[in-house]
Image (cartoon, helix red, strand yellow):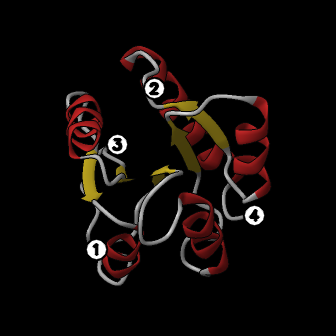
Amino acid sequence: MPGTNSGNSKCIMIVDDELPILGLFELTLRRPGFTVVTADSAKSALQLLDSCKPDLFIVDMIMPDMDGLELCQQIRSRSDTSTKPILLISARHDPATVDRALAAGADDFMWKLTPQFKLMRTVQMLLEHNAGNGAH
C-alpha cells in the first residue's frame, strides 16, 4: 500500500494543540519504530487525511478550533478511517470525560500524563485488536 513502510511499522497520527505533549508522544512512539504524523489542530488533522492513512489516531479532547470529540466523529464518518482505532486523551480524567470520549466513538481513553510504558501498551493493544478484527 503506498505511503506505508515495509515491515511492521504502523502509522500513528497524534493530534494535540499543546506542542510539548505532541513532541513527547511523537518521541515515545517513534522510538519503537512507528511512523508518526502530527497535527496541532483538528482541522490540520483532517487536511492530512487527504495524503495520509494512519493505522491509529491519538486525539486530544480539548482543542481550540474543533474539540477531539467532534474530530473523533469526523474520523468515524469517513469510509477510509471509520474502523481505525482512536485513543482520546485529556488532562481531565473523570468518569464523565471517559463516558463522553467513548460515546463519541473512541476505542479507548487515556489521561494525558499516563506513563509512557502504559501508552505503548495501549497503542499495541488497539493495533492488535484492530488487525484481528480486519475490516469490520
Look at mark 4 in the image and give the residue it sits on.
136
Gap in Å between the C-alphas at discs 3 and 4? 21 Å
Quick one: which residue is furthest to the front in this view? 64
Q: Can residue 8 be seen in this snapshot? A: yes
Question: In terms of sequence position, does the residue under pointer 4 or pointer 1 come before the other?
Answer: 1
Look at mark 3 in the image and give the residue it sits on.
8
Look at mark 1 in the image and give the residue it sits on.
2
Residue 101 in the image, given as x and y percentages of width and height: 69, 49
Relative horizontal placement of residue 14, taking residue 3 as reference (left or right): right
Residue 96 in the image, given as x and y percentages of width and height: 78, 38
Residue 119 in the image, given as x and y percentages of width and height: 45, 26
Gap in Å between the C-alphas at discs 2 and 1? 27 Å
Depth check, mark 2 against mark 4: the one in front is 2
Relative to 45, residue 133 above or below:
above
The residue under the point 70% across, 40% down is 97
Identity of the amino acid at label 3?
A: Asn
Element assignment for label 4: loop
Look at mark 2 in the image and give the residue it sits on.
119
The residue under the point 29% across, 46% down is 18
